[in-house]
Image: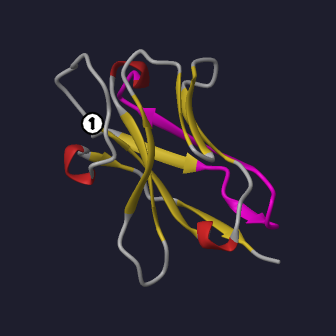
Amino acid sequence: QAQLVESGGGLVHPGGSLRLSCTASSFTLDNYPIAWFRQAPGKEREGVACVSPYSANNKRGRFTVSRNNAKKAVDLQIDNLNPEDTALYYCALKGPPIRLGGCTVNMLEYNYWGQGTQVTVYS
């Protein structure tokens, strides 16, 4: 059974940056779409950004998803953090078969999920 593991969460002041990382057993991450989602207390889970198979990175506003082949990971860089970014951040993988094409942040398309890493932005 594939397992995704997120890391890099923590406490940060507004205006700061954070880099989260997602690693996986049993999968070569480069072959699949990877997305990041987040869920704040009392709110629904929402998509943040994603990266397509064999694509190096994808920037969506303050959020940049990038593949880190040296670490065998997919990272999420969040810039200019604000308190509204406080949430549990999850990475997800759209598993086999391998497909070419783009990616989306539609939760229903992703069938492997990590346990999440907490990001807290406070003044």
In x, y percent, where is residue 84? 61, 72
Magenta segment, which residues?
A: 7-28
Vertical order, 72 against 35 (above or below)? above
Residue name at image x 36 percent, y 21 percent: 53
Q: From the viewer's perspective, is 1 left or right of 27?
A: left
Pointer 1 residue: 94
Residue at 76% across, 51% down: 17
Residue 42 vertical position relative to residue 120 in the rendered view, above or below? below
- The structure's colour scheme is secondary structure
Of 47 and 92, the residue lying toward us? 47
Provide residue 33's location: percent of width, then percent of height.
34, 30
Residue 14 counted in the magenta span: yes
Side of 22 relative to 26 (left or right)? right
Left or right: 38, with 102 as reference point: right
**The C terminus sits in image quarter:** bottom right
Task: Please check the rendered image and state whether residue 26 is part of the magenta-colored stretch, yes or no.
Answer: yes
* Residue 46 position in % (x across, y down): 39, 61
